[in-house]
Image: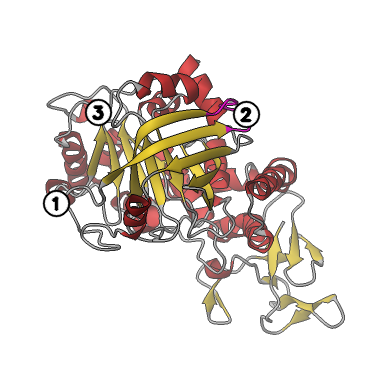
């Protein structure tokens, strides 16, 4: 591993609490906070260039509890507002800082200090827990999906503590080198809401080119035409199929409803080859990278098998491909989200994140407890899609009382199309169990705290643990 990657690992280490102390003219900071994106808030059709202008901070001092141990101050640092929709804020804006934008000499110094010349601070406006982003990226990492490093930061501006932010690694060359076996010579694109591998979208220049050697997007056009012509067969020639199936499975069971498969949004697309001027199919190997993970695992949201993306529809319409997707869901349900891994790995990691957020100055205990329940529900959502009872020592737990029912061959999960109390089972993430022999529902009697058998489904339901 290179020294730069070592520095990045230290800087973005989850236990490294960053402090970013910004000083800039008050009127400039007020202007940055108040500004709105060009094209308007949540205008996904805007294609008129940068949405925000750069400002200049007089100085930025950066330090960490572990890295960098000694604070360092940089002059004339570029600062720009980010987020033009859900995370947009005029009181606690997300920002990007570029230490070398105005002073080229800063680049070598800051990269030797923290491994990067620019950082992103996300405001967590849509995540009251503050921990969804680092938790999501850690879980994606366990699923072997390319994902950025991140930790927590306190941002101070002109002496005012702006609160807790997530310090998220940018999708730049060092990220590519780490996640794609050293290759940073491919084309990288960012997909916003509505962007897809569709020739009309590509020709309309809606998709943002981020880096690489050929920004004319010919590789995307070749890929889109192959998919349009040969469907899933064509898709398998231009995407990393197995990697896409993993992403699709994780987006489904982690309720990433603002991701690629459900909403064609919050995704980076990397052509993991060396970019060439006139690509053919053999010059294309597209891989998907999740981002915008601050709304995963929200209460009362679907465990939705997305179908908005062209590739998602092709998978769902092909029996073998859908079987591959279900197999990936089963694998993640029995490994990453198994009870054993939950208790030994996932829960301790959430505990760790909660402690770190508290050290940073936030105490979102109730919100984090809600997220803990959602994490436990992941296996439930997975098995609802599979239509199976797990073969391990799973129990079903009554949400309200915590009383458990051991699984057995006498119980089954209703078909995925079943509805309970007028709501799709996938929206609740809970099971309603029904006895095969009698056809009656197993429910929970709140007063007597015993398991009962009823003719119809009752309001108390169960989640898998």
Q: Position of residue 301 (x, y in %)?
A: 51, 66
| Residue at horizontal 14 percent and vertical 51 percent from the top | 200
Helix, strand or loop at mark 3: loop
Quadrant assignment for the C terminus: bottom right
Q: Is residue 109 left or right of residue 332?
A: left
Q: Is residue 50 or residue 171 the one in the foreground?
A: 50
Question: Nearer the observer, disc 3 or disc 2?
Answer: 2
Q: Is residue 251 or residue 382 the one in the foreground?
A: 251
Residue 270, by quadrant, is: top left
To which residue does mark 3 refer? Answer: 212
Assess whether mark 1 and mark 3 are in contact (beta carbons under 8 angstroms).
Answer: no
| Residue at horizontal 63 percent and vertical 65 percent from the top | 413
Q: Position of residue 236 (x, y in %)?
A: 31, 37
Q: Of the numbered discs in the image, which one, if any, rests on residue 172?
A: none
Q: CA distance from mark 1 to mark 2?
A: 48 Å
Assess whether mark 2 and mark 1 are in contact (beta carbons under 8 angstroms).
Answer: no
Helix, strand or loop at mark 1: helix
Local crowd size for mark 3, using a 10 Å CA cut-off: few (<14), some (14–19), many (≥20):
some
Q: Is residue 100 left or right of residue 150?
A: left
Local crowd size for mark 2, using a 10 Å CA cut-off: few (<14), some (14–19), many (≥20):
some
């Amino acid at each position: 591993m290179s020294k730069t990657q070592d520095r990045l690992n230290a800087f973005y280490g989850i236990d490294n609490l960053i402090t970013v102390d910004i000083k800039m003219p008050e009127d400039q900071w007020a202007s940055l906070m108040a500004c709105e994106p060009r094209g308007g808030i949540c205008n996904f059709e805007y294609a008129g260039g940068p949405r925000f202008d750069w400002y200049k901070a007089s100085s930025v001092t950066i330090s960490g509890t572990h890295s960098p141990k000694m604070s360092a101050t940089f002059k004339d640092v570029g600062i720009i507002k980010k987020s033009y929709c859900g995370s947009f804020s005029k009181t606690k804006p997300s920002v990007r800082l570029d230490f070398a934008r105005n002073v080229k000499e800063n680049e070598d110094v800051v990269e030797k200090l923290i491994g990067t010349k620019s950082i992103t601070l996300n405001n967590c406006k849509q995540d009251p827990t503050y921990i969804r982003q680092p938790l999501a990226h850690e879980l994606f990492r366990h699923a072997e999906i390319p994902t950025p490093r991140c930790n927590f930061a306190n941002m101070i501006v002109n002496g005012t503590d702006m609160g807790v932010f997530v310090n998220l690694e940018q999708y730049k060359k060092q990220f590519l080198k780490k996640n794609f076996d050293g290759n940073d010579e491919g084309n990288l694109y960012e997909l916003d809401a509505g962007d897809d591998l569709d020739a009309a979208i590509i020709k309309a220049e809606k998709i943002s080119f981020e880096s690489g050697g050929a920004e004319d997007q010919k590789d995307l056009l070749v890929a889109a035409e192959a998919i349009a012509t040969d469907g899933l067969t064509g898709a398998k020639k231009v995407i990393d199929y197995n990697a896409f199936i993993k992403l699709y499975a994780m987006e489904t069971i982690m309720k990433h409803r603002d991701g690629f498969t459900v909403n064609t949004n919050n995704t980076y697309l990397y052509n993991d080859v060396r970019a060439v001027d006139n690509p053919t199919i053999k010059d294309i190997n597209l891989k998907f990278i999740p981002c915008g993970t601050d709304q995963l695992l929200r209460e009362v949201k679907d465990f939705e098998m997305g179908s908005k993306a062209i590739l998602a529809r092709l998978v769902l319409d092909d029996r073998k491909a859908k079987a591959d997707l279900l197999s990936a869901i089963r694998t993640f349900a029995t490994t990453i989200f198994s009870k054993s891994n939950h208790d030994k790995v996932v829960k301790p990691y959430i505990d760790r994140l909660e402690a770190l957020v508290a050290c940073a100055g936030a105490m979102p205990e109730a919100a984090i407890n809600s997220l803990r329940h959602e994490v436990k529900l992941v296996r439930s959502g997975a098995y609802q899609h599979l239509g199976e009872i797990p073969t391990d020592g799973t129990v079903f737990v009554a949400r309200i009382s915590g009383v458990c029912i051991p699984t057995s061959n006498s119980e089954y999960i209703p078909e995925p199309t079943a509805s309970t109390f007028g709501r799709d089972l996938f929206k609740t993430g809970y099971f309603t169990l029904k006895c095969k022999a009698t056809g009656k529902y197993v429910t929970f009697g709140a007063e007597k705290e015993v398991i009962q058998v009823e003719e119809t489904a009752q309001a108390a339901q169960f989640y898998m643990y």
